[in-house]
Amino acid sequence: MTKNTITYLKEMACNLRKDVMTTVHLAGDGHPGPAMSVADIIAVLYFNFLRVDPENPRWQERDRFILSKGHSCPTVYAALARRGFFSPDLLPGLRKLGSILQGHPDMKKTPGIDMTTGSLGNGLSTGLGMAAAGRYLGLDYTTYVVMGDGELQEGIIWEAAMAAVHLKTNKLIAIIDNNNFQSGGVIDCVSGLNPILPKWEAFGWHCQEIDGHDYEQIISALQKAKAEIGRPSVILAHTVKGKGVSFMEGDNSWHKRVPTEAELKQALAELGGEVG
Amino acid sequence: MKTVASTREAFTAAMMELAKEDPAFVLVCADSVKALRATPFQDAYPERLFDVGIAEQNSVAFAAGLASCGLVPFVGTYAGFLTMRACEQMRTFVAYPGLNVKFVGINGGLFGGEREGVTHQFFEDLGIVRSIPGFTVVVPADASQVVKATKAIAACKGPAYLRLGSGREHVVFDDKMTFELGKARILKEYGKDTAIFTNGFIIPRVLKAAEILKDQGINVTVVEVHTLKPLDTDFIIDILKQTGAAISVEDHNIIGGLGSAIAEVSTENFPAPLARVGLKDIYPISGEAEALLDFFEMGVGNIIDAVKKVMEQKKKLSR
């Protein structure tokens, strides 16, 4: 992995963050905090790992990506637009009547979305189904599922975690955006989850733990996960909610909040960089 | 001649035939292989049987994932665990995106659950799936109909729900009886005094009641509505116009199933007196199937009483 690649990916993540702030502001609705914490991971996936074809969003052999924490969709919508699945002009239409960009990812309305999500907990199960279908059909794609940490409170995730190992699932990579917050506040105050990784280890997953904003770690972890055979892989990524904008970092009021004109201006100034 | 045949075995037989023709058909179970009598399928097609264990929500969302890649999964387990525990998965991850997943719910009705008790007797399933947009809902009368219905829903595009029972169902029709998805049909036409709309394993009781009524000078038309959704509304309206009164008979809560569907059609198109025979929105108990249905007022006598009740109402309206 070259330094140039990482520079490029950092720039793309910066663009995604600017897109998120602008989109949510213009849309008048959205979840910017959780969208920001996962931006680096999304940038690496969409601009370095995912084998997808914007001209052919339903290409049978494509890699699958599921944003199980669907409320972070502004980041993924921005990534899809920048990869050419649809025009970036559509981004401000988020959540508005008639938009292809629904409040949560919609596989029928938005090209490039592999599974409808938003109702937390379900992404891993659907991803497991996709991975199983790949093996059955003899296709060589990888299925990536990005989950939130609060989302791990949903029981169905553990059903899928159990089944994934029992079915000796290959090519299923789960990434947990561990920003330590959920809607109601700090996770440990709402319903404690820690320790997270030992739970996955106990279930039989290949486990890794990284700084979710460190590109070398993200890339290395994904490469190691891809090399796993005979069992699924999970990456616990420590992140900061609202990452990238000083007045948002660690402030849970940005879970669901629209930046004002002034806030948007300051955020864009802080994020700087080329709007590519 | 066989008088009892298993709807569960019939389903598996149909799956075997489907699987032989097309590798896209697969079966997803939630530790329900034995319950579905699907061991022959598991033996013949081990790579096509996905058992995720006692995890119904996962089984449905997993099937959605399979279907998104072009497979046609049938998800089979207990009707209530499917439609209640995994209702949201059926709705948001299958029906909403229109994925081609078929659902098979066993233990439908008191006849289906019988001695198991309330936890395994399911009388809300049809009301639930009927209210989810995009679902085809089928309630076959017996095992030979299950074979045809399974193939019919396999051929139709999009989500479908098929109601099975305990495996101890009466034989209602001979093998020559066809099955046409979405079409209601007349089973007996003694006369136009009242219509009896019905479906499922309770049909033998309806036919018996119709015979007794005929002997008493009341001549009914018995209509099978095996496809609850999409409903054959034109046919139903036509029958209502001819009879001017109707009852519904189903092994389901009187709220949400066939009775509610007929009431909706009638009220909006041709208001007519209607009485609903079914479980009267109460919880049942364990018991042997026939005795249980009688105990909960779904007996032949109850069907006859319901017909006489709407005939009275019809008479009063025509004065």
Image: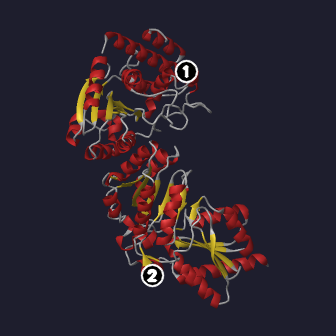
Instruction: Name the subunit of mark 2.
Output: B
Q: Nearer the viewer, residue A176 or B36?
A: B36
Q: Amino acid at mark 1?
A: Pro
Q: Residue B314 appears in which quarter of the rendering?
A: bottom right
Instruction: From the top left corner, tell me how far across and down residue B93 is, in percent.
Output: 46, 45
User: On residue B3, which mark appears?
Assistant: 2
Which residue is found at the position 25% from the left and 36% from the top? A229
Q: Between B317 and B196, which is closer to the camera in this rendering?
A: B196
Can residue A38 be seen here? The reply is yes
Horizontally, is A10 left or right of B228 in the view?
left
Kind of element beneath mark 2: loop
Badge 2: how crowded within 10 Å, few (<14), some, or many (20+)?
few
Q: Pick the residue in front: A207 or B38.
A: B38
What is the count of numbered marks?
2
Q: Is residue B253 left or right of residue B86?
A: right
Report which residue position mark 1 lands on: A88
